[in-house]
Every structure is written in C-alpha cells, then in structure tokens.
Amino acid sequence: SSDVCSSDLNIEPTVTAHSPIASINIQKFIKNTILNPVLTISTNTGYAPMGWGLPAALGALSAKSSDRLICITGDGGLMMSLQDLASIPQDSNFILFLYNNFGYLTQRQTQLSTFGRLTGVDQSSGLKFPNYSGIAKAFDLKYFLISPKDNLKSKVSEVFQETGPIFVEVL
C-alpha cells in the first residue's frame, strides 16, 4: 500500500509515548505509518516509568487543542494507569495505541539477565492481563485490533477515519 502520513489525512497529531515503548518502537511507528511528520511529541527518557504514557496524554489533551491526541503505550504501562481511561473525554479525538507484548518487557529483560528466570512478568510466569476489547467497551471506547498479519498502514488509516476516543490494540 502507499505511504500514509498525517498530512495526507489532514491532521496535526500530538503524540505521547513512554519507555520502553518510546525507545524501542515509536521511531519505527512514526516512520512507517501516519505520524510522519508529527508536530508535537512528548516522551520520557531514562527511567522507564511504567504508566506514564496515558496520564501524560490526558495532560496534553487538556493543555493543547489538536486534531488528534495519540498515546502510544505498552500493556504493562497501561496496567499501571488503567483507571485513567475513565478520564478520556467522550467528545475527544483521543487514540490509545496499546502495544501488546503480553507482559512486562523491561522486567522480563532484567529478570532474565540478572536471575536467569522469570517471575510474574508474563502468562507463563504467573501474570494475567485482561481482554482489552472488553476494557475498551467498559470505557465506551471504539476498539480496533491490529495483528501481525494486517497491513499496518491501512489499519492505522482506517482508525484515523473514525472520530471520538479509540482504543487500538497492536499485537
């Protein structure tokens, strides 16, 4: 498919993302999808505070008017601030991109390198995460799923055709 960028969709997004998602994936995501060029991006660096992304996005939403407010976070980070989904205004064009790697990536890496075993970092080591489509429904958010077999650009473009708050789970 052809490249899709924010200028093609006539939007001026503001983006927040947290580490490790920010350091691992956001540059590739921005380069390969609709967020090129991005006018405003806010990310934390250095300390990897899980859960920072969603509250930061809500702060940006209240501070700046933008065509779209995009929050890129991981499943572990979202679990640290899940209750903040209740604060997303229903009349906003808020999009939450949840990168689902099925656990706590940073803790997984640290436990493996330090202890050589895993405890409570993914399903195989005793961690359970919710069904995110059910979470989206509980907070009245439109839900999209992007799986590895999907064309990322076309699915993201489809998401941007929608209005209102949206929850996008990316596997």
Image (cartoon, rainbow, N blue to C red):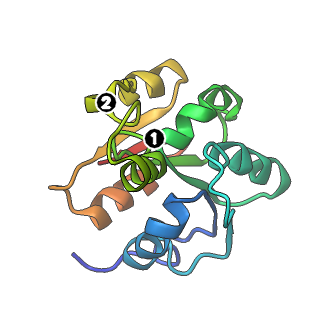
Exactly how many numbered labels are in the figure? Answer: 2
What's the amino acid at mark 1?
Asp
Indicate left or right for 60 with 52 as reference.
right
Q: Position of residue 59 (x, y in %)?
A: 79, 48
- Find residue 19 and report its image quarter: bottom right
Where 127 sits versus 4, above or below?
above
Q: Residue at the location (55% across, 42% down)?
A: 77
Most distant residue in the right direction:
63
Whether residue 151 is visible? yes
What is the three-letter code of the residue carrying label 2? Ser
166 or 22, which lies in front?
A: 22
Between marks 2 and 1, how big is the CA–CA gap?
A: 16 Å
Q: Earlier in the sequence, mark 2 or mark 1?
A: 1
- Callout 1 environment at 10 Å: few (<14), some (14 to 19), or many (20+)? many
Relative to 133, 9 lies left or right? right
Q: Residues within 10 Å of mark 2 (few under 14, many from 20)?
A: few
Residue 79 screen position, x and y as percent: 54, 32
Q: Nearer the viewer, mark 2 or mark 1?
A: 2
Q: Are marks 2 and 1 in contact (CB under 8 Å)?
A: no
Secondary structure state at the residue bearing disc 2: helix
Left or right of 117 in this view: 49? right
Residue at point 71%, 30% (across, down)? 87
Q: Nearer the viewer, residue 29 or 9?
A: 29
Q: Residue at x 54, y 64 (%)?
A: 22
- Residue 23: % across, % down: 52, 69
- Residue at which label 2 appears: 125
Residue denoted by label 1: 75
Q: Position of residue 9 (x, y in %)?
A: 48, 70
Q: Secondary structure at mark 1?
A: helix
Q: Is residue 11 above or below residue 144?
A: below
- Hey, which residue is sitting farthest left in the picture? 149
